[in-house]
């Protein structure tokens, strides 16, 4: 079992290195990821707010202090890589969902959520918090 896990992790790190997502010392190559994001064709089609949110999401995941799991057989650097990848995926999803909610905000009756003077972005954030909260509530019921 341990050899199987080690082989899979070796494959993943090898692929991430070849994609230039990891540096030779297994640190995440944040500069490369930011550059790849900024020069992608999709990024060029997005409005300024979404672009700023995607960059901010990447910055957040870079600066976040990932808790180490001493019980894990996975090396600390690998734990950090996996945690970063999960964070990046989750925050990117959040940005995309916020964009969709903003785009379709008028399709919903949000009169109970909306406060006077609030921007549409603030209301969209509230909707997202409700959605994430409901999902987290379902997860808690498993325990």
Image (cartoon, helix red, strand yellow):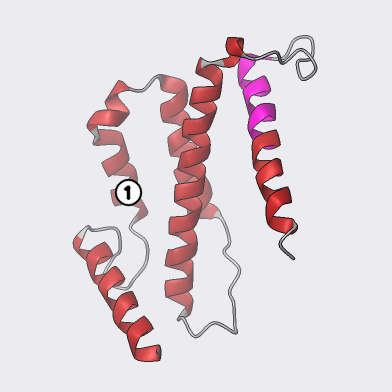
Image coordinates for residue 99, horizontal then vertical, percent: 49, 25
Specify whether 85 is left or right of 11.
right
- 28 displayed left or right of 65: left
Label 1 environment density (alpha carbons within 10 Å; few <14, some 14–19, many ≥20): some
- Residue at position x 73%, y 57% from top? 140
Seen at 26% across and 73% down, the residue is: 11
Residue segment shown in magenta = 119-129
Q: Quadrant of the C terminus?
A: bottom right
Percent position (x, y) of residue 90? 51, 47
Q: Which residue is mark 1?
A: 33
Q: Is residue 125 magenta?
A: yes
Looking at the image, which residue is at 66% across and 28% down?
127
Residue 107 painted magenta: no
x and y percentages locating residue 43 in the rendered image: 31, 30
In the displayed structure, would residue 45 be above or below residue 63? above
Q: Main secondary structure of the magenta part?
A: helix
Depth check: give the residue in front, 119 or 138.
138
Where residue 4 sits, quadrant-wise, is bottom left
Question: In this view of the protein, which residue sits in the foreground, 100 or 87?
Answer: 100
What is the secondary structure assignment of the residue under circle 1? Answer: helix
Residue 142 occupies quadrant = bottom right
> In this picture, is 44 found above or below 103?
below
- Residue 135 against residue 1 in the figure, above or below: above
Report the residue that reaches farthest toward the front. 142
Give the total of numbered labels.
Answer: 1
In which quadrant of the rendered image does the N terminus lie? bottom left
Q: Is residue 113 above or below residue 78?
A: above
Residue at 34 percent across and 71 percent down: it is 26
Residue 102's x, y, as percent?
55, 19
């Amino acid at each position: 079992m341990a050899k199987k896990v080690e082989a899979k992790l070796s494959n993943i790190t090898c692929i991430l290195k070849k994609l230039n997502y990891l540096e030779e010392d297994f640190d995440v190559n944040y500069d490369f990821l930011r550059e790849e994001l900024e020069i992608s064709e999709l990024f060029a089609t997005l409005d300024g707010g979404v672009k700023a949110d995607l960059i901010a999401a990447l910055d957040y995941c870079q600066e976040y202090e990932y808790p180490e799991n001493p019980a894990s057989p996975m090396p600390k650097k690998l734990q950090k890589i996996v945690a970063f990848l999960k964070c990046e995926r989750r925050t990117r999803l959040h940005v995309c969902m916020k964009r969709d909610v903003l785009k379709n905000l008028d399709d919903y009756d949000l009169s109970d959520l909306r406060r006077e003077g609030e921007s549409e972005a603030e209301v969209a954030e509230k909707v997202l918090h409700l959605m994430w909260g409901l999902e987290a509530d379902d997860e808690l019921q498993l325990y």
